[in-house]
């Protein structure tokens, strides 16, 4: 069987010419890697600025009537350095001039932001001697700004399958009127998944700067273990909860087609990385805990009313108040006379007065208590369901570290335990849980 791989390379993997050369070697070392999705140049060192961030800065400067030429020059100089070191023939000045014209005529932020991947992919295509295919010609959004899957898979599939190889820029596509629209930040992962699905690849490789999905955030836990195998479901939980190595939406296109994802390290191409699939290989046992991830910035709104459980529809009415104010809920642990709704603080703070007034008027509660500065941590594992005492372990780990649990919830699929703690204890809690449940 002819194996076909779609390989996506992230910002750090393409941050400068020496990284791009490594990437070219990886690509050429396996002829199955026929379709390559590229990010914009990312950080070369920790306080470097991503090209995408510079492009957004140009846009906000232009919008505020400020001079953006110094920022645009920085972008142009970074590309010029790459072009020179790779020895390719590329007219960066005309690309930059076009961005400048668009910025002056008042564009949306999406257009300039997309140029980071657009220009980088064109340069990489030249360096590889491969065709460049613009994402705006093969990835389409509908009027609502949602991916038009059918048109995209069909158009991208037909176009790419007619080519031997191609480099495709990540992060964006086109609206029905042809205007550029980007995915949310980190969205080149989504493009990679879409391309893998469209060309019916056997594997979607996602190359980054770590040797796979780690069982905890490496910026918080020292040397966390690499997860060798993980299911789409576990990965989705972890990435939604903040394990930022892969965009939370990147699993969907490939998952439907059963295409596995392999997260690999551009700087250590010999490492196997993490394999993500629908089920684990037969000889691998399900782990009780596969990984831990979390996010800050939540508030819990706790509503108390005696005899609440006898009042049909109380929970539904409460959640509807949040829904009609545009605030999705993250968790909703309930007791006999209490119900808490955990929501993003940012969204809640915008509508706080209205929401509280509506709860008082429509539900007549005894008390409403608001807890701010909440961090939510998920302990995720498909094998958790068959292990006794998991919650006890979580309590024990946090109690020993002197951390107060402010909320606990278990997902209905028994795939995760969720705890809410004070944001100030976030790093301590992640480390305590990692030591007890994974290390
Ligand atoms: P790329 O630019 O290649 O898309 P990202 O910066 O988006 O890379 O994602 C990789 C980074 O994700 C890592 O450098 C790491 O700091 C961070 N990260 C956070 N949580 C995890 C995790 N659980 N496993 C691996 N990396 C993680
Ligand atoms: N360059 C974009 C960003 O910085 C998309 C990506 O790298 O995935 O968010
Ligand atoms: Mg990324």
Image (cartoon, grey):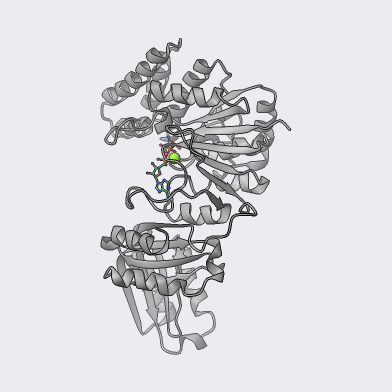
Q: Quadrant of the N terminus?
A: top right
Q: Residue 195, relative to residue 76: is it above or below? A: below
Q: Quadrant of the C terminus?
A: bottom left
Which residue is painted at 39% across and 22% down in the image? 18
Along the line of sight, which residue is nearer the eye, 343 or 380?
380
Which residue is painted at 39% across and 17% down in the image? 97
Residue 306, image x and y in percent? 41, 89
Along the line of sight, which residue is nearer the eye, 372 or 386?
386
Which quadrant of the structure image shows residue 139? top right
Q: Residue 177, relative to residue 29: is it above or below? A: below
Which quadrant of the structure image shows residue 93? top left
Left or right relative to 418: residue 274: right
Residue 125, image x and y in percent? 52, 19
Which residue is painted at 52% across and 38% down in the image? 206
Ligand 1 picture quarter: top left
Which quadrant of the structure image shows residue 341? bottom left
Which residue is painted at 53% across and 64% down in the image? 415
Q: Residue 59, relative to residue 377: is it above or below? A: above
């Amino acid at each position: 069987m002819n194996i076909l791989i779609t390989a996506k390379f992230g910002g750090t993997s393409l941050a400068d010419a020496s990284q791009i050369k490594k990437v070219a070697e990886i690509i050429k070392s396996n002829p199955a890697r026929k379709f390559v999705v590229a990010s914009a140049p990312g950080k070369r060192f920790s306080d470097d600025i991503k090209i995408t961030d510079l492009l957004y800065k140009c846009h906000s400067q232009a919008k505020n009537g400020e001079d953006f030429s110094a920022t645009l020059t920085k972008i142009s100089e970074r590309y010029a350095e790459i072009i020179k070191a790779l020895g390719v023939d590329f007219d960066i000045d005309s690309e930059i001039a076009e961005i400048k014209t668009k910025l002056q005529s008042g564009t949306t932020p999406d257009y300039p932001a997309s140029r980071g991947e657009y220009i980088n992919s064109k340069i990489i295509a030249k360096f590889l001697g491969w065709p460049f295919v613009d994402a705006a010609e093969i990835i389409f959004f509908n009027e609502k700004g949602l991916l038009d899957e059918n048109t995209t898979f069909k158009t991208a599939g037909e176009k790419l399958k007619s080519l031997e190889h191609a480099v495709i820029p990540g992060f964006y596509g086109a609206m029905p009127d042809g205007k550029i629209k980007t995915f949310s930040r980190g969205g080149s992962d989504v493009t990679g998944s879409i391309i893998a699905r469209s060309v019916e690849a056997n594997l979607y490789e996602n190359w980054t700067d770590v040797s796979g999905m780690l069982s905890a955030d490496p910026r918080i836990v020292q040397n966390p273990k690499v997860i060798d195998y993980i299911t789409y479901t576990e990965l989705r939980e972890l990435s939604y909860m903040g394990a930022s190595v892969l965009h939370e939406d990147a699993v969907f296109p490939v998952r439907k087609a059963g295409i596995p994802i392999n997260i690999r390290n551009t700087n250590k191409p010999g490492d196997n990385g993490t394999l993500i699939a629908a089920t684990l290989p037969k000889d691998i046992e399900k782990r009780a805990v596969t990984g831990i991830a979390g996010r800050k910035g939540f508030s819990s709104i706790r509503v108390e009313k005696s005899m609440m459980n006898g009042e049909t529809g109380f929970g539904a009415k409460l959640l509807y108040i949040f829904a009609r104010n545009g605030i999705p809920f993250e968790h909703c642990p309930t007791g006999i006379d209490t119900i808490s709704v955990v929501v993003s603080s940012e969204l809640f703070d915008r509508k706080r007065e209205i929401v509280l007034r509506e709860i008082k008027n429509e539900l007549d509660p005894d008390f409403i208590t608001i807890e701010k500065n909440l961090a939510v941590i998920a302990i995720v594992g498909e094998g958790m369901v068959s292990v006794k005492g998991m919650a006890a372990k979580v309590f024990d780990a946090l109690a020993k570290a002197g951390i107060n649990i402010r909320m606990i919830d278990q997902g209905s699929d028994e795939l995760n335990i969720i705890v809410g703690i004070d944001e100030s204890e976030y790093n301590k809690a992640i480390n305590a849980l990692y030591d007890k449940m994974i290390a």
